[in-house]
């Protein structure tokens, strides 16, 4: 294969989603030669079509340190990738629709404060109204993370790819990895289009297909392939800045600068991963629409112009797999972000680069070890 | 809704009541299948026979005999027992789910009717979604006063309206001549017709002329064209066009033999042929292919109109442009095949019944290759210059699409994610063919290689309120993903 003759990578990254591109970028920044193998094209699946939420709010406590560190990168994302990625920070808000829900979010803040994190706060009804004038009257308060925001997913992933390429990374798109084997300290990676590539180190950032890579090295994982659904409205006059979710229901609600409103939150369609295809479940889309109907009365007459779903990996405990393989040296995993990996993209790529170039990272990744699924 | 099988509402749903849909529904229902004909308009007829039951244009010679043929399709529909639901918008057809228990896989149609959304369950769907005008992206085509000739023709059929003030028609293709002729009959003012048919097309089309000479349309088409040419100013060999005006159209600038000319105009009617309206088929997951002769995408179908999705077939211009008479016959063939697939008629019975329809279809398609070749739009009007808007919804220029290609976008889907082109309410109806060709030209590859938008339902906008009120099945609450 000519690619291996002319270019001998130090690291092969499997998967051209945001996590693969971020790992490629951070490695390239350190002078590591990276080859990214993407079975379709960069950002084809979850990385290109997700809701774009850049959110620390409401995360699993194990993810909070990573999320906070990633947020710092997001706020200077232009320095990292030479593109602002459409990132805007107007905060994220999780509304409480009852006193009981308000109690839940108060307990959440107390838990975070005890761990030393202060980015989330509870606001009462008046401040909620000030932040989101359009919110329905019955909402009594909210959990708020003011530094949060949203970005444009495809543009973001593309920007990571472009910067990585500018720093010397190579991308090979259109060939699914079919075989992964290690011999004499060298990984050999074969793709369905008949190519074979070699490198001392491999990163598995294959998203909803990552379990197949892991299985090849004898560490099967209980990865579930899911298809979170989103829908978007025709343009309406700008009326909201923050991204809004709900405490007791599934929702992600955001207005773009052009006036269109994105509605999602993780209600699921059905993924057919071998065909790169998703099927929408309109009974579930309807549940999502009903939530908006309840929380944003001004949206009842809005028109929905499109809905879609992306193919994503979900782990049983809803947190990703990050870190070295438990069975093979020189193999690192970064997958299973369970429909909330977009915000973590910038930092997890750095963590992976830390592990590869320095053998350790200063962030607590023990909870994400693939070993938790070992028999 | 009454249905023999509690699991399905109808055996067959036909989407669209143009010639293909009318003929398909009438034939299928006449053979005993329960059939529902779903259509957006208040009256049957589709675009070609739009308002054929109620047009205010009562002088038959204005719209011509081909238009009035549409009325003949209505009697059989009425007598067939098919249920006709006018005013119904179909926004989704879901392909069968492989994991359904007991292997029973009816199709689900998402529709809006009387302000409410609902899911309809049927065994077979015949999509008869017809054609759309091919986008005609020129500088200024978004100005008020510039519209498609097809849209103008709809106004004539439905309301008897013709443009007021200085009117220029520009482009190529049979519909342009037909509309000009209809306007002449209606006494409308037309200042000029700017013919953009490329000179070299004649050379390419000439070998196909013998086929066209056997076409039933030849005589009518020639007479109509001669009529128009005798009575109107027709300016040929136009190689560039732009619409100018400040907030509204004021003039049309065209290039002929390398020289620019300017015509004052209040209305500019553009047309350069029609392409299949494939949005619903595409969103349903039907495979499609690039048709190099018609320079458009068309869903892949077999000789009966069956698509790659089980239980979904296509009839009429939505499967490839063939005209109204061909659509009618294709509708009948699709209906026979659906009846066969549903077990109502045997294969032999289907094939026997199909023979006259197939012969009529062949006759109707005679000469089509000549027309396709002669009226292939010039590259300049399919692949516009950088400053021309291609996506009207998001105001994306051809130059922006080319820049995205240079940054690594290899096809319309990447360009869509990157630029938002094709993401607006029209879902690519007004930019899809252009974006495909601009990307292909920029990359130096065939349009087949760059692909087309993956379209998603709802293919027609529905309100949030309708969607929120959608009758629920036992929603699998466990599937609700909380984070």
Image (spheres, rainbow, N blue to C red):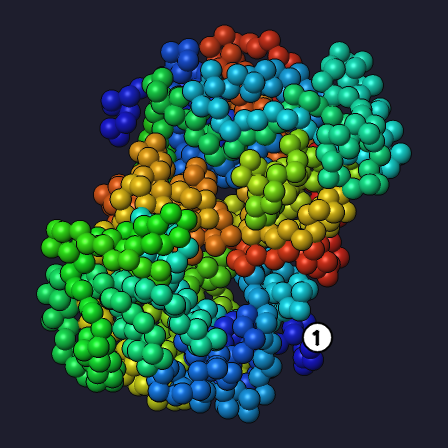
- Residue designated by label 1: B6
Q: Nearer the viewer, residue A299 or A183?
A: A299
SS label for mark 1: loop
Q: Chain of mark 1?
A: B
Q: Quadrant of the N terminus of chain B?
A: bottom right
Task: Give the image location of residue A208, x and y in percent.
Answer: 54, 37
Whether A5 is drawn above or below B203: the answer is above
Q: Nearer the viewer, residue B53 or B450?
A: B53
Q: Is residue A266 left or right of residue B427?
A: right
Task: Give the image location of residue B363, x and y in percent.
Answer: 27, 83
Give the residue at x 82% y 37%: A139
Give the residue at x 28% y 58%: B264
Task: Give the image location of residue A361, x and y in percent.
Answer: 57, 10
Q: Quadrant of the C terminus of chain B?
A: top right
Q: Is residue A10 left or right of residue B158?
A: left
Residue that sits furthest to the right in the current view: A99
Q: Nearer the viewer, residue B457 or B463?
A: B463
Task: Classify 10 Å Cα crowding around label 1: few (below 14), some (14-19), many (20 and above).
Answer: few
Q: Quadrant of residue B98?
A: bottom right
């Amino acid at each position: 294969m000519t690619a291996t003759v002319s270019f001998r990578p130090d690291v092969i990254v499997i998967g051209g989603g945001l996590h693969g591109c971020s790992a490629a970028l951070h490695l390239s920044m350190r002078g590591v030669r990276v080859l990214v193998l993407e079975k379709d094209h960069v950002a084809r699946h979850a990385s290109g079509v997700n809701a774009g939420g850049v959110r620390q709010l409401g995360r699993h406590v194990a993810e909070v340190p990573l999320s906070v560190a990633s947020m710092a990168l997001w706020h200077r994302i232009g320095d990292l990738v030479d593109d602002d990625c459409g990132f805007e920070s107007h905060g994220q808000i999780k509304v409480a629709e009852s006193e009981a829900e308000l109690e839940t979010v108060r307990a959440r803040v107390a838990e975070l404060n005890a761990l030393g994190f202060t980015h989330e706060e509870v606001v009462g009804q008046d401040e909620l109204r000030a932040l989101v004038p359009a919110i329905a009257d019955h909402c009594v308060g909210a959990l708020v993370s003011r530094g949060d925001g949203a970005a444009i997913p495809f543009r973001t992933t593309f920007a990571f790819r472009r910067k990585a390429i500018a720093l010397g990374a190579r991308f090979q798109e259109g060939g699914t990895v079919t075989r992964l084997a290690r011999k004499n300290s060298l990984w050999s990676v074969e793709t369905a289009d008949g190519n074979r590539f070699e490198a001392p180190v491999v990163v598995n950032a294959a998203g909803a297909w990552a379990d197949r890579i892991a299985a090849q090295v004898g560490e099967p994982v209980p990865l579930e392939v899911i298809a979170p659904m989103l829908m978007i409205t025709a343009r309406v006059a700008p009326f909201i800045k923050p991204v809004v979710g709900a405490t007791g229901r599934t929702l992600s609600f955001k207005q773009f600068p052009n006036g269109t409103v994105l509605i999602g939150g993780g209600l699921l369609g059905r993924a057919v991963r071998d065909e790169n295809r998703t099927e929408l479940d309109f009974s579930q889309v309807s549940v999502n629409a009903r939530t908006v109907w309840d929380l944003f009365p001004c949206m009842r007459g809005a028109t929905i112009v499109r809905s879609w779903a992306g193919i994503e990996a979900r782990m049983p405990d809803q947190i990703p797999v990050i870190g070295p393989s438990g069975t093979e040296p020189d193999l690192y995993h970064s997958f299973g972000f369970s429909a909330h990996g977009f915000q973590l993209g910038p930092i997890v790529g750095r963590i992976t680069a830390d592990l590869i170039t320095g053998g350790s990272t200063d962030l607590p990744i023990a909870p994400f070890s693939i070993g938790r699924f070992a028999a | 809704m009454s249905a023999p099988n509690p699991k399905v509402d109808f055996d067959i749903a036909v989407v669209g009541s143009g010639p293909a849909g009318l003929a398909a529904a009438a034939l299928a229902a006449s053979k005993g299948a329960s059939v529902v004909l779903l259509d957006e308009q208040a009256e049957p007829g589709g675009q070609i026979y739009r308002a054929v039951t109620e047009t205010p244009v009562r002088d038959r010679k204005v719209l011509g005999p081909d238009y009035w043929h549409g009325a003949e399709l209505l009697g059989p529909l009425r007598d067939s027992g098919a249920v006709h639901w006018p005013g119904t918008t179909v926004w989704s057809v879901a392909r069968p789910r492989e994991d359904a228990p007991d292997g029973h896989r009816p199709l689900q149609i998402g529709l809006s009717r009387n302000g409410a959304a609902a899911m309809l369950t049927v065994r077979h769907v015949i999509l008869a979604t017809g054609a759309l005008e091919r986008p005609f992206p020129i500088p200024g085509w978004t100005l008020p006063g510039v519209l498609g000739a097809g849209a103008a023709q709809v106004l004539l059929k439905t309301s008897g309206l013709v443009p007021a003030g200085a009117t220029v028609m520009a482009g190529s293709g049979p519909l342009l001549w037909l509309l000009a002729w209809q306007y002449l009959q209606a006494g409308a003012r037309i200042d000029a017709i700017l013919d953009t048919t490329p000179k070299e097309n004649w050379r390419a089309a000439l070998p196909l002329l013998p086929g066209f000479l056997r076409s039933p349309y030849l005589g009518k088409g020639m007479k109509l064209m001669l009529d128009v040419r005798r009575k109107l100013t027709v300016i040929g060999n136009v190689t560039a066009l732009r619409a100018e005006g400040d907030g509204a159209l004021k003039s049309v600038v065209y290039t002929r033999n390398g020289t620019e000319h300017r015509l004052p105009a209040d209305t500019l009617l553009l047309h350069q042929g029609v392409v299949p309206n494939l949005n619903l088929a595409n969103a349903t997951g039907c495979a499609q292919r690039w048709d190099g002769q018609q320079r458009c995408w068309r869903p892949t179908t077999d000789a009966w109109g069956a698509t790659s999705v089980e239980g979904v077939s296509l009839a009429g211009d939505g499967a490839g442009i063939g005209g109204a008479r061909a659509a009618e016959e294709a509708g009948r063939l699709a209906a026979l095949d659906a009846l066969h697939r549903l077990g109502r008629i045997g294969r032999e019975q289907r094939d026997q019944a199909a023979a006259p329809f197939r012969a009529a279809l062949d006759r109707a398609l005679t000469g089509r290759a000549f027309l396709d070749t002669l009226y292939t739009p010039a590259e300049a009007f399919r692949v516009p210059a950088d400053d021309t808007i291609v996506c009207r919804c998001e105001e994306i220029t051809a130059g922006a699409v080319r820049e995205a290609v240079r940054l690594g976008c290899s096809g319309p889907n990447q360009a869509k994610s990157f630029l938002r082109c094709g993401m607006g309410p029209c879902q690519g109806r007004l930019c899809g063919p252009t974006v495909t060709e601009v990307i292909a030209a920029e990359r130096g590859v065939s349009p087949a290689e760059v692909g087309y938008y993956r379209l998603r339902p709802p293919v027609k906008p529905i309100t949030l309120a309708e969607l929120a009120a959608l009758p629920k099945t036992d929603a699998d609450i466990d599937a609700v993903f909380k984070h």
